[in-house]
Image (cartoon, coloured by chain):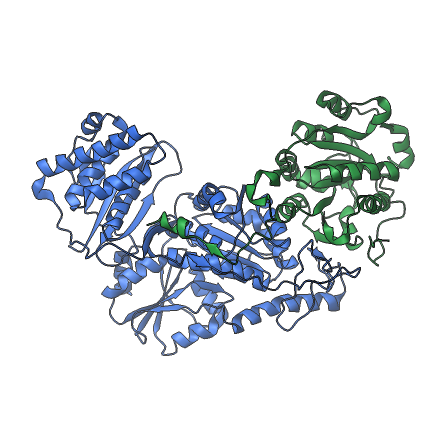
Chain colours: A blue, B green
Amino acid sequence: MAFLNWKIAGAAGEGIKISGLMLQKTAFRSGFFTYGSTEYPSLIRGGHNTFEVIISTKPVQSARTRVDLLVDLKTSTIASLPFPLSDLAKESGNLLTKNTVALGGSCALLALDLTILKQVITETFGSKDQSIIDQNHQAAQLGFDYALKNYPDKKLKLDTPKKPHQDKIMICGNEALALGAVAGGMKFYCAYPMTPSTPILHYLAANAQKLNLVVNHAEDEIGVINMAIGAGFAGVRSMVATSGGGFSLMVEGLGLAGGTETPLVIILGMRPGPASGMPTWSGQGDLLFAINAAQDEFPRIVLAPGDPEEAFDLAAKAQNLAEKYQLPVIILSDKNMGEGYYTSQRPPDKYKNRRYSLAPEAAESDQPFPRYLVTDTGISPRPLPGQPGGVHLANSYEHDELGYATEISAERVKQMNKRLKKLETILGGGDLIAPQLFGPKSAKTTLVSWGSNKGAIVDALPQLPDINYLHFSWMWPFPEKQFKALISHNPRLVTIEGNATAQLAKLIAQQTGIIIKDKILKYDGRRFYPEEIIEAVKKL
Amino acid sequence: MTKRVTTISPTWCPGCGNFAILGAIKAALDQLGIKPHQAAFVYDVGCSGNMADFVFAYGFHALHGRGLPPAAGIKLANHRLKVFVIIGDGGAYGEGAGHFLQLCRSNHDVTVLAHDNFLYSLTTGQKSPTTPKGQATPSTPNGTIDEPFNPLATALTNSAAFVARGFAGDIPHLTKLLVAAAKHPGFSLIDVLQPCPTYNKSRPYAWYREHVEYLDKLGHDPTSLEAAWKASLKTDKLPLGIFYQVARTPWHENFALLKNTTLKDSPIDNLDITAALDEFK
């Protein structure tokens, strides 16, 4: 077989995720394409945690409903076969190596190379005592040998990949967002922990020194966004990340970034709500919130990467867009993408970022700088505090070109128009990303979706003849012209979304007048599986 | 003479304490020799925050209650700037109380001038966190029920390294405090007693003159936390001066990255993430 699904299940606190990641890495290093995903409740001990890994000789980017090989720590079985995990762990000298025994056993049944697993173990426990590494090596060996001896005929006949990957990495969406932002010149990351965006904070905090940035866990989300705006005003590329609840707290600050025209990148990792909702599950219910959240109207950019590759690229691009257009950029993520581990194209190692829209150096002056000068593009040159000749007021109140507060009707209209002009500038410029087409160009039916549904839909597509897929990663300002060009042959449109009211379809209706009648919607907190997309599309 | 103010005329009421505080700011900047482009002022929203239009220096007029976090962000981005926060008792101790505690504890190197007039004046005189118990205001017509917030004791309890109180009726003294606070490396709080002639009729200048006393004339030791606490709890008299000052590492000095450069000038035109990417191989 070219494809199988391995899964490990146990209680929270049993190391399910780390075990799953080790198995995935072993398969990835062997040259397989892999997709790893985890499900867990919002608690620290007990409950029911799982991590599953799709192992395939062909590219794969989504989970499957069918499990081929289940490691169940509770019943001490692998693929329903009795497996003395605790006894073998004891034999290794450390009862905590139960999972590693199971990984060794899994390697045998999957015909994976045990030496790769041992190398992954060494790297995973690298910071611990050598004795821990030795015990885990021993546990893996014991599990491997036990499976070979007792279940020689139970091996799954998985095709072997031709060669190991050269240009791929195994990375989750959150890590890709974090590293992409770094590549885009982010120097300050500020956050308050909130699932599913917390891993971004953990990754950046652990690597801040190596990556030359400052990371701050601030007092609350309001402090987070306002501190990042202060840093942005003073010239530092800054980013914050949160989920829907934290974003709700940040909304007044979002307006502040909009009104003062301060660059800022916000990652909104969506989860089911409202209120505290289902913290450790996934959803796509915040698209229209991200586009519309505001006191009054101001320009913003909203992006929705579908996988780590896009997450990296868009996080890097967001830093540049925010500075260039002097506005907030929101990146919509979710648990599926953020905590999904993909086999991803390795991005380039080196980045030459340039600065945008800054005022040129000048001599000292006793005149205020026209920070909000009306221009053709809506973008006004921005001096940074400390710069001679650039003294100005960035103002949350409506202001004139000099930044001073005004309530004069003509000035108000001038500044509103100037700010909103930036949307036209963006739509007419080269930064916008058109919806990406997968499948035959003039198919009879076009699936329309956005964000993390990409993987499941792309994986479903080969089994859906005469159907193509339009993937939106640039949500706002809405790429109307580009979208219309892609559906000029009038295909039947079907929207696929992780929310209850088809928010992308609403957005399309609002911007284009096109009504999408066919909807495949899921809002139970779970991901889309390719199987259910195929079934749902066939039923239409 | 260095230009310190814009051409816009202040919109404060006649007799407002803000005029005097602005005067002290001008004098302090002159004494410190800070040029307009070398200072960043963050203004909260309120009568005091309206100073944004009048001061000639880099400025950021923030949201109500949110003046403190942007100041911390500005200092982080460019620690060579002198950063001041113009904020009221409502913004600092009410809406922004969480940020106030955070800046005290983190020791962000900013000087906070809390214009404490014991009321929300820009919204026409409702109670503020510092309003004395029992005082009738438009939002508490039968008198406030709450005990008043004690900013100085709160700052001291939360490890603020420079805690002082000034009075808008004594510009030279307030100027001295401002100079000392700006020179202090790390967070500094000056709670400024500020008469509001329009809405706080019970506390005119004359009332303050009868109720203030000067710490330096009382032999106060500003290195003693215990003495500072005692002074901060006084209610019969309102002591003025530096209650407490101690050396603590400013927040931004905890980052090795900022030893030789500011964060805003930390290069982004030649980034190499090879090592970080290798961890995902």
Q: Is residue A447 visible?
A: yes
Relative depth, front residue between A508 and A415:
A415
Q: Nearer the viewer, residue A9 or B281?
A: B281
Q: Position of residue A234 (x, y in %)?
A: 64, 53
A440, B176: nearer the viewer = B176
Q: Which residue is situated farthest in the front direction here?
A: B260
Count of marks, rendered view: 0
Residue shown at the point (13%, 34%) measured from the top left: A146
Among all residues in the image, which is located at the extreme left? Answer: A153
Q: Residue drawn 72% across and 20% down?
A: B226
| Rendered view: B71 above or below B272 | above
Query: Relative to A519, is A95 on the left or the right?
Result: left
Q: Percent from the top left, x then y, of residue B33? A: 80, 47
Residue at the far right in the pictured view: B206
Q: Is residue A501 visible?
A: no
Residue A148 appears left or right of B75: left
- Compared with B73, B245 (above or below) is above
Position of residue A399 measured from the top left corner of the image (x, y, whole percent): 72, 61
Q: Residue at x 66, y 34 (%)?
A: B104
Query: Is B63 left or right of A337, judged from the image as shown?
Result: right
Q: Give coordinates of residue A308: x percent, y percent.
A: 38, 55
Snapshot quadrant of residue B135 = top right
